[in-house]
């Protein structure tokens, strides 16, 4: 009798100890948990320090796909933790290498993280200059990726003319299961511009954030579902909570606890995007391309030829959409935008925390 009672007690003890509810969430990388239960906090970053093994900084002259003007560096001056917050701060390349070098020098990035060698060096001269702003882009590509869950980021946006299309927290596919962008999708938890008093009928600067997804078969055949939210005080005036809820039924975006957008999967994203031809996701789930693991990116970018051509408080945008000359025009006319960066604390993107829960 005693052995049977003992066995029953052991079964009860195990059942109480192992109350893990199954989860559809998956995660991988050096910071991912080995076991995942529904409702579990599977990633937490409070930035008491900046671990650059978890948040790997890019080192590249790449234009980020938007023909931007920044130079991403791993320098502690541009990405650092202070007072329990991540700071990404833009600085001038001229302060580091001198104005002459910006306009006529040569730089090779010995620590380049870009697979395209063309983005690892710059030779200035004529209309070509060294990227004039140093900033940071951090990624969890090798440390943490996840599929399905709830992402929460608490952040304060920077104030500074022509900062775009970061400040941003966004997600890219880790394995690029369906091919290069936009075939495997992209998620923008939020992105914004640093300008104040920017726009015509609606302010589209620091008073507005965008939250959206992107997908499609190729660059010139893509779709986006997105939502904008305005705040008259500006998103630089305090910290806000940005959330992304993602499961097999679709995606939702929330701001400060209130839902601002919902994209249900319905009949799948091929049909939702209105694409013709052969469905590149036909053999996958209806959630494709959002049925694979994505990783996190935090960055602060500057300018670019896709920056909306709307007057801001200092007048017309100080460059044309000719990529051959745009970066030099931006730098030459720095008297129009640099004064707004003088308070570098305010012109820094600040992130208080990043958390991901399983569902």
Image (cartoon, grey):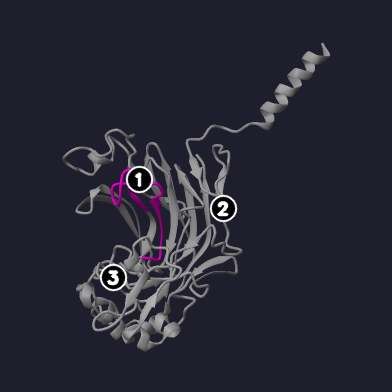
> How far separated are the C-alphas under marks 2 and 3?
32 Å
Residue at x-position 58% and y-position 41%:
34
Answer whether residue 175 is magenta in the image. Answer: yes
Q: Earlier in the sequence, mark 2 or mark 3?
A: 2
Badge number at residue 339 = none
Q: Which of the marked residues, 2 or 1, is nearer the chain's N terminus?
A: 2
Q: Is residue 59 visible?
A: yes
Is residue 345 on the magenta stretch?
no
Q: Quick one: label 3, few (<14), some, or many (20+) residues within 10 Å?
A: many
Q: Residue at coordinates 27% horizontally, 79% vertically from top-left?
A: 128
Vertical position of residue 255 compared to residue 286: above or below: below
Q: Residue 290 in the image: state x and y as whole percent.
A: 36, 43
Q: Check whether the beta carbons of the residues at disc 2 and disc 1 lie within 8 A of each other.
A: no
SS class, disc 3: loop
| 82, above or below 128, in the image | above
Residue 44 drawn at (x, y percent)? 56, 53
Residue furthest out toward the top = 1
Which image quarter is the N terminus in? top right
């Amino acid at each position: 009798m005693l052995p049977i009672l003992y066995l029953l007690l052991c079964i009860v003890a195990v059942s109480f100890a192992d109350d893990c509810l199954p989860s559809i969430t998956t995660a991988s990388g050096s910071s991912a948990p080995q076991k995942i239960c529904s409702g579990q906090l599977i990633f937490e970053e409070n930035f008491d320090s900046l671990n650059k093994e978890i948040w790997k900084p890019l080192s590249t002259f790449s234009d980020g796909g938007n023909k931007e003007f920044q130079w991403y560096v791993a320098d502690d001056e541009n990405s650092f933790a202070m007072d329990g917050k991540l700071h990404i701060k833009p600085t001038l390349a001229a302060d580091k290498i001198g104005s002459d070098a910006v306009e006529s020098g040569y730089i090779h990035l010995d620590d380049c993280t870009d697979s395209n060698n063309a983005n690892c060096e710059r030779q200035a001269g004529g209309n070509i200059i060294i990227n004039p702003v140093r900033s940071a882009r951090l990624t969890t590509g090798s440390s943490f990726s996840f599929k399905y869950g709830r992402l929460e980021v608490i952040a304060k946006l920077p104030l500074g003319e022509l900062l775009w299309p970061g400040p941003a927290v966004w997600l890219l596919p880790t394995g690029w299961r369906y091919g290069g962008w936009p075939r495997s999708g992209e998620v923008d938890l939020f992105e914004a511009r640093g300008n104040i008093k920017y726009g015509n009928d609606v302010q589209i600067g620091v008073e507005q954030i965008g939250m959206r997804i992107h997908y499609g078969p190729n660059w010139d055949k893509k779709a986006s579902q997105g939502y904008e939210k305005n705040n008259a005080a500006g998103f630089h005036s305090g910290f806000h909570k940005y959330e992304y809820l993602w499961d097999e039924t679709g995606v939702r975006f929330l701001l400060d606890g209130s839902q601002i957008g919902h994209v249900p999967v319905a009949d799948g994203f091929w049909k939702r995007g209105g694409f013709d031809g052969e469905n590149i996701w036909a053999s996958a789930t209806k959630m494709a391309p959002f049925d694979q693991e994505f990783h996190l990116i935090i960055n602060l970018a500057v300018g670019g030829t896709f920056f909306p051509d709307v007057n801001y408080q200092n007048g017309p945008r100080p460059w044309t959409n000719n990529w051959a000359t745009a970066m030099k025009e931006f730098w030459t006319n720095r008297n129009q935008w640099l004064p707004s960066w003088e308070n570098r604390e305010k012109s820094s993107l600040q992130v208080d925390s990043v958390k991901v829960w399983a569902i």
